Amino acid sequence: MQTFCTIITSDYLPFAKALHKSLKQFVPEISLQVLVTDEHNFASSKNFTVHSVNSILNSSVAKNIHKKYAFTSGSYLRWALKPVFINYLFQNNYDKVIYSDADLFFVSNFNFLLEELDNNNFILSPHWAKINPLENGNSLMEVLNGGLYNAGFIGVNRQGIEAINWWAEMCHFKTEDNPELGLFYDQKYLDILPVQFEGVKILTHKGCNLASWNIETCKRRIIDGKLVINQVFEPVFIHFNSETIANILNGNDKLLKPFLEEYMQLLKAEGFDLYRNKNFDFSKFNSPFLKLKYKLLLRTRFKRFLFKLAERL
Amino acid sequence: MQTFCTIITADYLPFAKVLHASLQKNVPGTALQVLVVDKNDFVSDEYFIIHPLESIISSSIAKDIYKKYAHTNPDHFRWALKPVFISYLLQKGFEKILFADSDIYFVNNFCFLFDELETSNILLTPHWSNPNPRENEGGLIHVLKDGLFNAGFIGANKKGLEALNCWAEMCHFKTEVNPGLGLFVDQKYLDILPVQFPGVKIIKHQGCNLASWNVKICKRENIDGKLIINRKFEPIFIHFTKETIVNILNHNDKLLYPYLEKYIEQVKKEGFDLPNKYSDLDFSKYYSLFLNLKHRLRIRTRLKGLLFNLAERI
């Protein structure tokens, strides 16, 4: 048995529904297990199963995580509960579980990801940040500080339980952003998995997890009227966090705009108006000035010129 | 063609010689290429080949690293030169290179490491620090902050050149300890290699790179009079850093003591007195009766274990 899962607070229900709809477009029978971490009275529907926190607190580490974060930080609780929820789903007879953040949006068939879990215990999705420090020093530091893999997408099979339990222990230990200790919430611990555990696959399909952090390394291009990544990969899923949305709207990542429009429509159908609810000034992104700015790319050209000059000196 | 290589300052020549002797003992005919970053009046022999700095400073990245570190920090300079030197040797015609810090000591046959380079482009050895923060918080933080892999040992073949160039660029960018930026000299950058490049193999043989940081995870045991790691692996090489030596001497890692004794003896033969080198280490104190008794009784360890178990149950 296989399933997707996500963890939300009750105000993110429309996002979970949009995620599920995007999944169903490609695999109509796919189920999504949704853990809602605050009070709610949501009902499950076909293949969209809602779980409450109390129902999954059946291990000591789950209880400890709840005790530590439930009353201090809602976000930390959600993040730290990822391995707990995945483990709970294994106890409920699922053999393969893919965790996705609620702001992921699938745009093509993802069956190969579930198939990867036939031969691998764990699948991880790299950030694919730019690692050439001369071109983008910040991006290199972001992966060194924030983690090599994005914790918004993880796939696990039953043999991965040992790794999942270890991750839960880590999240209980410290879920915090503390670069001095090498910590970054639940995410940085994932760096250790390929070293410490067997069967951890690093996904190399660059159509996975398209987001603001990989604009440069996962190059978007239209070929024969279709979006293709690095001239090879079909886009599989997009991570619509605020940064990604801003990058699409301000023209840095404009080839993802049709997907964003579709996403916004789906959210609207679920009663969530992204225009109104996120703190974006959407109108500014449509201004003629911005369009001109992105045609001319003056700052980029000037920076490139200085960069080349610096290299020659 | 395959070879080992190391990078030293002139005063570490005895260590390079002992490293080479340990290689020769286990696989006769193994060559060691030695880059000496300061003096250049040493003489090579058939299997111990000295390279002066001038010979490798040909590429622009090598020149940049030289400009940036040669006159500011000799340690950073040596570390940043690793990918440059390995690349240089690969371009010279070697097909497989194993870089080893000069304080590494081989105690068994290592041919399987060269064999790994038939199918893998880069070899990395994990630190194998204890990742359980409840048992050892320092172990977990160490790998997250300082790097998953130890930069004292790296293997590469010709297909690994791209990864080596990337590593060299990063070392040129910043070779420094700066946890706020996620940096730890040349070592932390290695974390990125398995993600970014194909054919990067993480060596899972836990007899490799035995050192102070893996006393707990790579368990040493004497079985039938032989040292065995985690009941499975033969010891292959030991990383005799100062911390490792202290751990052996204070009995935390006493099963490595016979190797340390041999190592000290060999280094001495090469004209280097290790006990004197670490002047802050009082070797005699580690032989005291009190210390022997302390390590037999392990009162503090037992008390900690008791409290730990108690804390877990509460």
Image: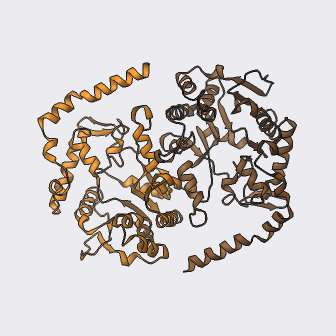
Chain colours: A orange, B brown
Q: Quadrant of residue B277?
A: top right
Figure quadrant of the N terminus of chain A: bottom left
B144 or A47: which is nearer to us? B144
> Image quadrant of residue B62?
top right
Number of marks drawn: 0
In this view of the protein, can residue B126 be seen by the observer?
A: yes
Q: Residue at x 73, y 22 (%)?
A: B40
User: Which corner quadrant holds the C terminus of chain A?
Assistant: top left
Residue at point 57%, 39% (across, down) = B186
Q: Residue A86 vs residue A245: left or right?
A: right
Residue A183 spot, x, y in % from top left: 47, 55
Task: Report x, y in % for residue A4.
Answer: 35, 63
Q: Is residue B94 above or below residue A112?
A: above
Relative to the observer, which residue lies in front, B304 or B199?
A: B304
Q: Residue at x 58, y 25 (%)?
A: B66
Measuring from the top left, give residue B129's x and y in whole percent: 62, 56
Q: Residue furthest front?
A: B280
Up the image or down, A76 lies above or below B114; here it is below
- Residue nearer the viewer, B17 or A116: B17
Residue A92 shows up from this direction? no
Tell me residue A88's x, y (percent): 43, 72
Which of the 4 image quarters holds residue B306?
Answer: bottom right
Residue found at the very far bottom of the displayed protein:
B314
- In the picture, measured across the screen, residue A263 lies left or right of residue B21, that is left
